[in-house]
């Protein structure tokens, strides 16, 4: 069994990908499976934490011993995460949150009419939940962790994002064929605001999750 080094702690993990509705039957979404976030929730529970998993549109079963809150859109996810974060020691934003949503929601299904060209879809910004969490810190010493998927200049882009978001740790994934989206494996570098850089070799998402919790445990205030 794992060391109970998160006993007495409350951690919040978001997972999956938001879906931003255009009309009652269509949405803008992304390819996140939720596997990394669910692995984080399972491993934190195994280490003794009370875990709130805010799950966005994942088909994975609710992990045992974890409080699961389901949220569909970025706005719903924000509400659920902020509520759970109020008394949390750490918040990990593993969810792929849509940066934009359709500016208008059509109450009825959008129809194609004869040969008429389709209307362009106008988008509006979603709130940046990670930046908000890092900027407000519901509790002194609360640890805020983000994820970033990059295709090039992984470390430089990761450092810039860590600073921009204001979080404590950022897990930077390189998006590739066999890893990250939908895969059971991942490979990443975990960047810390205090300068640390922890490479995580290609392997199961549970291994990355445990490495991240090691870094979190070291940084949350005692007591
Ligand atoms: O800016 P980017 O989408 O690359 O940042 C990714 C990180 O920010 C992830 O941790 C994701 O959960 C979080 N995020 C967020 N709200 C958004 C967009 C991203 O919390 N609107």
Image (cartoon, rainbow, N blue to C red):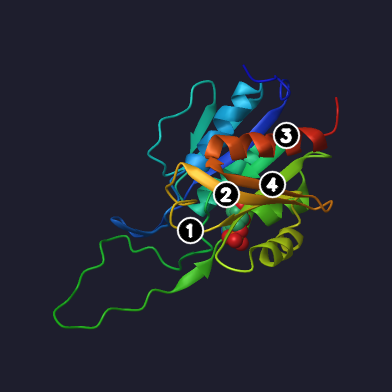
In-front residue for pair 98/38: 38
Proximity of marks 2 and 1: CB atoms separated by less than 8 Å: yes
Nearer the viewer's eye, disc 2 or disc 3? 2
Proximity of marks 3 and 4: CB atoms separated by less than 8 Å: no
* Residue with the mark numbered 3: 214
Gap in angstroms between the C-alphas marked 4 and 2:
17 Å
* Mark 3 C-beta to ligand 1 under 8 Å: no
N-terminal of the two: label 2 or label 3? 2
* Mark 4 C-beta to ligand 1 under 8 Å: yes
Q: Under tag 1, what secondary structure? A: loop
* Residue with the mark numbered 4: 145
Nearer the viewer's eye, disc 1 or disc 3? 1
The quadrant in which the N terminus is found is top right
Near mark 4 (Cα within 10 A), the count class, few <14, some 14-19 or many ≥20, is many
Q: Under tag 2, what secondary structure? A: strand
Query: In the rendered view, would you say 2 is above or below 210?
Result: above
Query: In the rendered view, would you say 13 is above or below 134?
Result: above
Nearer the viewer's eye, disc 3 or disc 4? 3
Near mark 2 (Cα within 10 A), the count class, few <14, some 14-19 or many ≥20, is many
Q: Under tag 4, what secondary structure? A: strand
């Amino acid at each position: 069994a794992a060391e109970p080094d998160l006993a007495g702690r409350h951690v919040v993990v978001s997972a999956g990908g938001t879906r931003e509705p255009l009309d009652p039957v269509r949405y803008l979404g992304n390819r996140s499976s939720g596997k990394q976030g669910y692995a984080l929730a399972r491993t934190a529970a195994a280490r003794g934490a009370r875990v709130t998993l805010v799950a966005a549109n994942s088909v994975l079963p609710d992990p045992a011993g974890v409080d699961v809150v389901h949220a569909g859109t970025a706005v719903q996810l924000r509400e659920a995460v902020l509520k759970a974060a109020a008394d949390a020691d750490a918040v990990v934003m593993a969810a792929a949150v849509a940066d934009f949503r359709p500016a208008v929601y059509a109450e009825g299904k959008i129809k194609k009419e004869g040969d008429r060209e389709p209307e362009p879809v106008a988008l509006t910004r979603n709130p940046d939940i990670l930046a908000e969490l890092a900027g407000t810190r519901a509790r002194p010493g609360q640890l805020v962790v983000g994820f970033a998927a990059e295709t090039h200049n992984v470390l430089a882009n990761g450092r810039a994002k860590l600073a921009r978001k204001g979080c404590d740790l950022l897990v930077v994934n390189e998006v590739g064929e066999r890893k990250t989206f939908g895969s059971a494996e991942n490979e990443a570098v975990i960047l810390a605001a205090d300068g640390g850089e922890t490479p995580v070799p290609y392997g199961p998402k549970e291994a990355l999750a445990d490495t991240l919790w090691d870094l979190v445990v070291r940084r949350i205030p005692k007591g």
